Image (cartoon, rainbow, N blue to C red):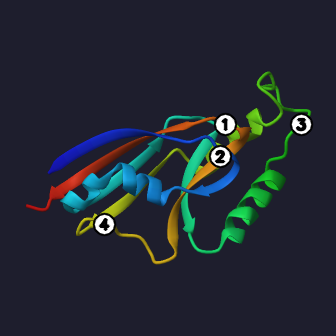
């Protein structure tokens, strides 16, 4: 078994759910060298997360944002962690709901995802800044 690891930085994005599949593939072309294995993606932040979902219809991503904003609203009187702005504590809660990592199978040099699946950056801050990802491949290289 071989292991490969790299880090990448995503450009800053506004609050929302953003497709980043192509950015990951462009940064980590080493996926093509693996016959089978897994790509693990880990985000090094507590106010953004990762998920896999619909990659074709952008209204899905809009609906995700609307639902998360309604489910975890800003400016609640019971929030104590408020010094970084009204979007910060809700962003921490939302990132716990989406999670910090994904594991995706690799088959014959490609991510083995469904036709309509894409990798999302779930940006939960109004302006979260650039985000760092750790990409780790575990698997058997194609010799």
**Residue depth check, mark 1 versus mark 3: number of the one nearer the observer:** 1
Check if mark 2's residue and mark 1's residue have beta carbons within 8 Å: yes
Check if mark 4's residue and mark 1's residue have beta carbons within 8 Å: no
**Residue drawn 92% across the image and 33% down it:** 77
Looking at the image, which residue sits at the far top? Answer: 83
Q: Residues within 10 Å of mark 2 (few under 14, many from 20)?
A: many
Secondary structure of the residue carrying tag 3 is: loop
The residue at which mark 1 appears reads as 128
Q: CA distance from mark 4 to mark 2?
A: 26 Å
Q: Earlier in the sequence, mark 3 or mark 2?
A: 3
The residue at which mark 3 appears reads as 75
Q: Residues within 10 Å of mark 4 (few under 14, many from 20)?
A: some
The residue at which mark 4 appears reads as 110
Q: Residues within 10 Å of mark 3 (few under 14, many from 20)?
A: some
Q: Earlier in the sequence, mark 3 or mark 4?
A: 3
The residue at which mark 2 appears reads as 123
List x then y, in percent, for residue 74.
85, 41
């Amino acid at each position: 078994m071989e292991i490969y690891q790299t880090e990448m930085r995503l450009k800053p994005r506004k609050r929302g759910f953003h497709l980043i599949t192509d950015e990951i593939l462009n940064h980590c072309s080493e996926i093509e060298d693996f016959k089978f294995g897994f790509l693990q993606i880990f985000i090094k932040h507590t106010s953004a997360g990762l998920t896999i979902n619909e990659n074709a219809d952008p209204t899905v991503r809009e609906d995700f944002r609307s639902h998360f904003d309604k489910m975890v609203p800003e400016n609640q009187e019971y929030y104590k962690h408020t010094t970084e702005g009204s979007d910060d504590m809700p962003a921490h809660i939302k990132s716990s709901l989406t999670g910090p990592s994904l594991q995706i199978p690799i088959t014959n040099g490609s991510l083995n995802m469904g036709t309509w699946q894409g990798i999302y950056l779930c940006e939960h801050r109004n302006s979260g800044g650039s985000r760092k990802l750790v990409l780790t491949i575990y698997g058997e290289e194609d010799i």
